[in-house]
Amino acid sequence: MITWLRHRAFGIIRKAIAIKFPSVPQLSPAALQAWLRDPDRNPPLLIDTRHPAEYRQSHLPQAIQVDPDISMTTLEARIGKEDREVVFYCSAGYRSSKLAARWIKQGHPRTHNLEGAIFAWANLGLPMECEGAPTRSVHPFHPCFSWLIRKHDPQQPKDNQDMP
């Protein structure tokens, strides 16, 4: 039952984000993972738009944390103005899509949002780290969202229903 509810919730979140931020291309976790593993492609810059406590608990390897309400001037100073591929993410996708939309409006078209964000990434068992070490732990943003994160049991196969 919880798997079905989680799957439906991600569907609703995905639709709401597409309506609210139509200019932001959404990149699936599987597509991002394939991109990161492709030696013939330059990896994108990964931007974690969650709050510092969320980032400290876990984040995608090589991601940098920025405040979700960062000014565009500060963001450009932090990550540069050059035309490069950037992937934003947060917990479920709203905060990162909002920042990605602002970044695109600033003239950075090679911008994506990680669809389903770190919740979907974690539910698929994809790599995350905490202080340079692998982890499975994910900050739920708020306790009411913790059910969106699948509890991982190494004995259980991955459940594709947890994909966004």
Image (tube, helix red, strand yellow):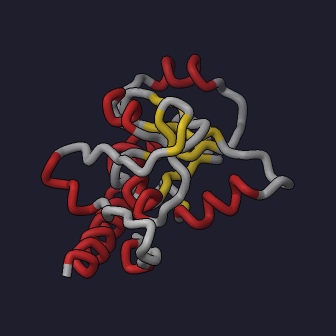
- x then y, percent, for residue 133: 54, 37
Q: Quadrant of residue 10?
A: bottom left
Whether residue 127 is visible to the viewer of this picture, yes or no, is yes
Furthest-front residue in this view: 155
In the rendered view, tell whether residue 22 sits above or below residue 76: below
Looking at this view, is 107 or 2 the one in front? 2
Looking at this view, is 143 or 94 the one in front? 143
Q: Residue at x 51, y 24 (%)?
A: 75
Whether residue 105 is visible to the viewer of this picture, yes or no, is no
Left or right: where 41 falls relative to 85: right
Q: Quadrant of residue 22?
A: bottom left
Q: Residue at x 72, y 46 (%)?
A: 43
- x then y, percent, for residue 47: 52, 37
Quadrant of the rendering where the N terminus is positioned: bottom left
Q: Residue at x 47, y 41 (%)?
A: 59
- x then y, percent, for residue 65: 46, 30
In the rendered view, tell whether residue 4 sits above or below residue 121: below
Q: Residue at x 71, y 36 (%)?
A: 83
